[in-house]
Image (spheres, rainbow, N blue to C red):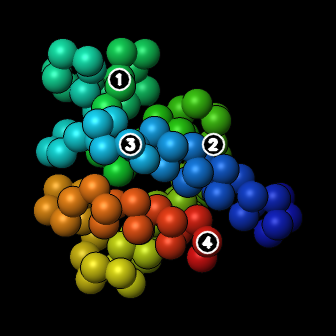
Amino acid sequence: MSAYIHEVAVNNILSLAFSLIEKEENRCIGVYAMDERGNYVRPQSREAVKFCSIGALHKAFFLLGSSNLDRNYAFRKINNASHYLYGDNMLTVNDNFGHKAVCDVYREAIKG
């Protein structure tokens, strides 16, 4: 796979994941995903309607059928952006820094 195609695939993953949590009411804290009743579910589940920042990535991987290489690079990009902006990993940013911080990190990862 060319570097360009790989980069496009990763940006598609990040963009889809971001779209799942861009609205604050679609984001959760402390678990990867929740159903509409607030119960924990796997991010790949049909019932999942809320996601943490990493759970959204898992849902995007599932929906897009992403390769392991693309998954690893997406994780790397999101964590690099998280460390760059907030000095910590994405799970910590998700659970402790608020929705705006999560959105900032996704935007940085997508543009970077």
Q: Amino acid at mark 3?
A: Lys
Q: Amino acid at mark 2?
A: Ser
Q: Mark 3 against mark 1, which lies toward the viewer? A: 3
Q: Is 83 drawn above or below residue 74 in the view shown?
A: below
Q: CA distance from mark 4 to mark 2?
A: 20 Å
Q: Amino acid at mark 4?
A: Lys
Label 2: state its secondary structure: loop
Q: CA distance from mark 3 to mark 1?
A: 15 Å
In the image, residue 5 lies at what x, y percent?
A: 81, 59
Residue matched to label 1: 48
Q: Mark 2 against mark 1, which lies toward the viewer? A: 1
Circle on res. 5? none
Q: Which quadrant would residue 51 be assigned to in this image? A: top left
Query: Which one is earlier in the sequence, the residue at label 4 or at label 3?
Result: 3
Query: Which one is earlier in the sequence, the residue at label 2 or at label 1?
Result: 1
Q: Amino acid at mark 1?
A: Ala
Q: Which quadrant would residue 25 be assigned to in this image? A: top left
* Number of numbered labels in the structure image: 4
Please tell me how crowded label 4 is: few (under 14), some (14-19), or many (20+) other residues with Cα within 10 Å: few
Circle on res. 66? 2
Residue matched to label 4: 111
Please tell me how crowded label 3 is: few (under 14), some (14-19), or many (20+) other residues with Cα within 10 Å: few
Label 3: state its secondary structure: loop
* Tag 4 near tag 2, CB within 8 Å: no
Circle on res. 23? 3
* Tag 4 near tag 3, CB within 8 Å: no
